Amino acid sequence: MTKPRAFFPALILLALVGIFLVLYATPEGLGLSDDSIAYIAGARSILSGDGYREAYLASNGYVTHFPPVFSITLAFIGLSGIDPLRAARFLVAFLFGANIFLSGLIGWKMTKSQVAGVALALLFLVNDSLFNVHVVAMSEPLYIFFTLAAFLTFDSGVKQLAVSQDGKTSNSKLFDSKWLILTGILTSLAYLTRYAGLALFATFLFALILLQDNWKKRLTSAGIFVVSFLPLTLAWSIRNKLVADNATNRTFVYHPLTEEHINSFIYNISEFLIPIESLRRAMVKDGTALFILVGIIALVLLIWTITTGLKKFFQPTSAMPEVLSFTNGLYIFGYLASIVSSMLFFDQATKFKLRILAPVYVSLFVLLIYLGFHVIARALSPKQSLSEKGIASSQRTLLAMTFSILYLSILFFSIPKTYTSAQALHLGGGQGLASFKWYDSKAMDFLAELPADTRIYTNQPGAVYLYADHPALVLPDLVDSVTGLPRGNFEEGVSKLQKDVLSGNAVLALFDTGTESAEMQKMYDQISANLYLALQTQGDRIYASKP
């Protein structure tokens, strides 16, 4: 491996460009959703000394649905006096730069090529999907950071002990305990950032079983990794059990994938795979070509991952496969299996949104660079066996040219798309709950002027907390969005809400009522029946007791 003279300055430059890009695109702050508000409110609650609570809700219960590390990180930054809402912008911008840097390290370590490392970092920087994940106040950027760091430490554990003191390859030990311990800790931090981190845990556990050369080493290394992973995760689970009588606020209930799940997958995967908008729309409209493309990619990766792992498992004396590419391949399938399992059995509300699929995109880029580097390296290699000359040599050259054109095409179409996204965000006045329509809302001004002890029932508790500085109460609901099961006691909940509003102690605030489905609108009409309409503006309605 050559000395990285210009490599680290190049990665740092790309990372700084990424940080600037996020800050440029978010002059009004990061995009906000209900989940974003939950994380920010949780961080404020930690800073206030109340623990990790749902401060945006009037119930102010303990948070178990969202793991704590993102909020803890915001609270840590908040110790300097910066509010977590502002801290999120600087944290996520930094994480975009850090993730670009770490991806470059992975490319370099994986291929021993500085050019490949820079190429991978550049792909991360200019990809519109990954950029858009880093302009929203959510936990995915931090999760990707811990994931990339864990891949690097796992790989370092192999490198440390795969070479003996005299410089000769040795298979007596393959994994260094201290690196395994660090990998276990980083994996637990990933899990405590997003519960999907359980897939990362499974990835490394399977890799240890497949890559070690006998069962004693497999069980020993796996045991070290598991013991390193457990303390933080068990502490969180025990805390949840004590304060809320559940480990992760998930209930085992089967609910099949819906058309909405499939459509969200098609849209977001097409956004990533096809940077040319006209071509993307044509492939999505037809559907068949896109499914064939995704199917081919998945099948090739699956066959390569299985054959690579099983070869080392059944032939322990064979050469160690390249660890970073292999674990990324294994992780793709483990992560997708984890997400689909969550949708089927634990959380129907989970969809194949951009942020959910983003970790897969990162691993796909890792494997693309790994494949491309080896194709080009073999084509340029002066040392060829007799069987590799002639037609085989010309085929390798053609493959190398094809990959080079593919990579340059990705950059050519990705750079203007990402720039356009950044420019639109810069001029757009904020995303989601950070939009100007919320902080210029007359309905929010009305709610902000209410007495502090007035209860507010609303379909937008996060927005009310953020802009009216008032914790809110959620509305009665017919169906639990997580389990997909009827909630029960809907009429009782509506009756209680209406009595509270009519007593003058509460108000009902309904936002964006004209954009809801007919079924949801019917439910709103039932909840607001016989209540006095105190304010109606821009699709927002506030009901109170009669003056």
Image (cartoon, helix red, strand yellow):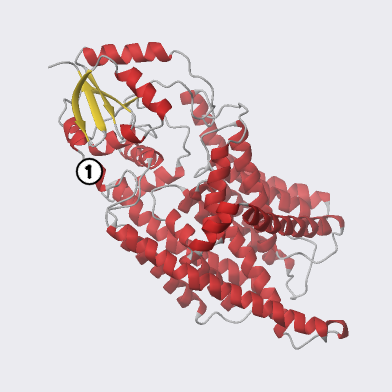
Q: Quadrant of residue 53?
A: top left
Frontmost residue, 76 versus 281: 281
Residue 495 left/right relative to 302 = left
Please state, as top left, top right, bottom left or bottom right, where the C terminus lies in the image: top left
Frontmost residue, 160 versus 499: 499
Q: Is residue 364 above or below residue 247?
A: below
Secondary structure of the residue carrying tag 1 is helix
Percent of width and height locating residue 99: 49, 61
Percent of width and height locating residue 11: 48, 72
Q: Is residue 164 above or below residue 188?
A: below
Please state, as top left, top right, bottom left or bottom right, where the N terminus lies in the image: bottom right
Q: Is residue 365 above or below residue 404?
A: above
Residue 183 left/right relative to 479 = right
How many numbered discs sit on the rendered protein?
1
**Residue beneath the point at 72% across and 53% down:** 207
Residue 358 left/right relative to 381 = left
Percent of width and height locating residue 514: 32, 34
User: Which residue is identified by label 1?
Assistant: 439
Q: Is residue 157 visible?
A: yes
Q: Residue furthest bottom?
A: 382
Task: Give the residue type that dot 1 points to.
Answer: Tyr
**Residue beneath the point at 70% across and 58% down:** 296
Percent of width and height locating residue 43: 35, 41
Q: Residue furthest left?
A: 547
